[in-house]
Amino acid sequence: MKTFHWSSLGAAASMVAILFATAWLMPAPSGTSVAQASFSLADEISQDQRRAAEAQARAALLGGQIGEDLTDIDELAAMETASGPIDGGLDYDLTAVSQGYAGVPRLSLISLPENLDQIRETEQRKAVFFKSVLPLVLQVNEQIVADRARLWELHAQKQSGSKLKALDRLWLAAMAERYGTRRGDIAALLSHHDVVPPSLALAQAATESAWGTSRFVREGNAMFGEWTFEDDHKGIVPNERLAGKSHRVRAFDSLYDSVQSYVTNLNKHRAYKEFRALRAEMRAKGQTVSGMRLASALHRYSERGAAYVSELHSIIAGNDLSLLDGARLNENGAFEPVI
């Protein structure tokens, strides 16, 4: 695969990128659309590829660095699986998202593309996986951010001596029951009810689901390998479950449900108390909630312990996933850059 390293070509490469974008590419429409197919085999360059090249040109103009090498456009046009092109509305530019030029569409896939494991190129397969899961993580986090804003507002009301409305008191009671905290302890709720950085969620989804190819994710949308012992939970019995064991891998009706359960698990289970404490410490110090740092507190997520943490670090670093921690969902189908 031919690649061109922007950092080494300097001003000449910048001019080439600009000329390429203006001479060969039609202007991309405003906002990010949800197309019916992500990777077309048509002879013409796709919308996704046009946007990627334009993002490259913009970065060159600004003197910025591109997170990944520019792949040969002919190879990009041939992105497909053995059974044909991937579909499912994944027509958005992940590189542009990571560079802050585009937002993430509000996709909610029921399940991963069936032919994901048939994509020939590893990097292409990874991109489809990340683009499928990222919108779900952001949507779960979006609701948590809204809840945290409400918690802070209610905290301020209590501090000022104002009486809370009955509906707010009921909501706080439900939240306290959910996380097993004392009623009225808003500080404890803020420690529990917080976001999981996309970089960490994507890395865990990748390793727990074998990059979307495991039996559990294919049969039950089990993205994060959660065990369950509850009879009322849907579950899949592992083929190699030891005699005398009763656990199942929890199954879900949709990928969104799987992501939501995973975030709740990290925010609630006693095994991840260290994870929550580290996140709260970052908040208290005004630091960015880092997926790379938080991964270090997840040695109890897997029986592999330190080796599991090391793998998460490798996935985050090797795929520049920390750049996606600043990703934002599109508002009403449009994206407005933050200056």
Image: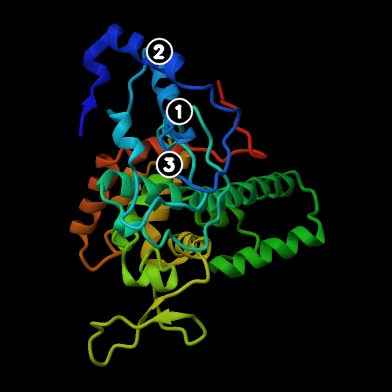
In the picture, the quarter occupied by the C terminus is top right
- Identified by mark 3, the residue type is Val
Q: Residue at x 31, y 67 (%)?
A: 214
Whether tag 3 and tag 1 are in contact, CB under 8 A, the answer is no
- Badge 3: how crowded within 10 Å, few (<14), some, or many (20+)? some
Q: Nearer the viewer, residue 213 or 91?
A: 91
Whether tag 3 and tag 2 are in contact, CB under 8 A, the answer is no
Q: Label 3: which residue?
A: 289
- Identified by mark 1, the residue type is Arg
Residue 324 location, x and y as percent?
42, 38
Q: Quadrant of residue 321?
A: top left
Q: Is residue 293 visible?
A: no
Q: Is residue 9 above or below residue 73?
A: above
Q: Which circle's residue, 3 or 2, is located before the other in the chain?
A: 2
Q: Residue at x 44, y 22 (%)?
A: 54
Residue 218 location, x and y as percent?
39, 69
